[in-house]
Image (spheres, rainbow, N blue to C red):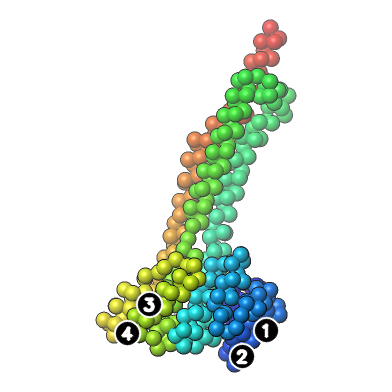
Amino acid sequence: MTASTPAAAVLRLAVLLEAGLPPLTAWRHLGESDPVAARVAEGGGADQLPAAILEATRDAAAASDWACVAAAWRVATDAGAPLAATLARLGEVLIATDDARREVEIALAGPLATSRVVLALPVLGLFGGALLGVDTLGVLATTPPGWFCLVAGGGLLLIARRWMRRLVARAREADPTPGLGCELVAVAVSGGAPASTALERAAAALAEAGLPPDDSAAPAITFAQRAGVPVAALLRAEARGARREAQAAVRMRIAALGTRLLLPLGLCVLPAFVALGVAPLLLAMISSTIASL
């Protein structure tokens, strides 16, 4: 884990703050080895750090994770919650999120490789006749039936490619911040804020960071108050459950992806293989037979 990842940066910040360094000084120390942190430290004073985080990481690769950092920082400072403990908890959450993303990419490796191989079959068929000594390329380039096969096969391949990309993108879709609303409300409650104020601060921080609203904390607070259990602990448990559910949903979509990829295979790729590989071969053989007669 490198210092440039949000999880690593947050955990290092937690250590620096726990050691007693002021927030801006901690960011400056972190900036000695992390260019993102250096830009944050240059962005303004201690009271402007959430906005500086958002501005410095707007185009970063993990912008959503940095937005979570900005939101958590805002809630912790507004509520007076321990900033070091908040960041340590957030760092563990971001590590779990990174692990979940890696699992998704690993699970997608098989379907992605299959889609690439399948899309290459019609192109291989295009040159298959030439390898057999049949002038399939000449048929495709110089005859009207060949032109039709070339246009039809190419169009089907383009449709299949876009279709497969869309299926993979849908399988990869996931909430980038599952359970964040509960985590932020838990931070505000830990700082001593009433439940209603904690909800308002969490909603304002999410909006400031450009993250989607999360209303899952309100029912958990109602349940905790009715049952007489600690609100913050229940909210963190709800956040862990939301992350598990989000990951399970992605796994289910990936498991179904293999079956869904059969649709473009059967409706587009196989007809494209026939149009680019089989039909030109037959046309070339028929032409050569007629010419020999």
Q: Amino acid at mark 1?
A: His
Q: Earlier in the sequence, mark 2 or mark 4?
A: 2
Q: Tell me the number on the disc at residue 21.
A: 2
Viewer-nearest of labels 4 and 1? 1
| Image quadrant assignment for residue 243 | bottom left
- Determine whether 281 is above or below 30 in the image: above
- Residue where numbered disc 3 is placed: 199
- Residue where numbered disc 1 is placed: 29
For mark 4, give the secondary structure.
loop
Instruction: Farthest residue to the bottom: give it.
Output: 20
C-alpha distance separating marks 4 and 1: 40 Å
Q: Amino acid at mark 2?
A: Leu
Residue found 72% across the figure and 29% down from its top? 131
Pointer 2 and pointer 4: residues touching (CB < 8 Å)? no
Q: Earlier in the sequence, mark 4 or mark 3?
A: 3
| Image quadrant assignment for residue 252 | bottom left
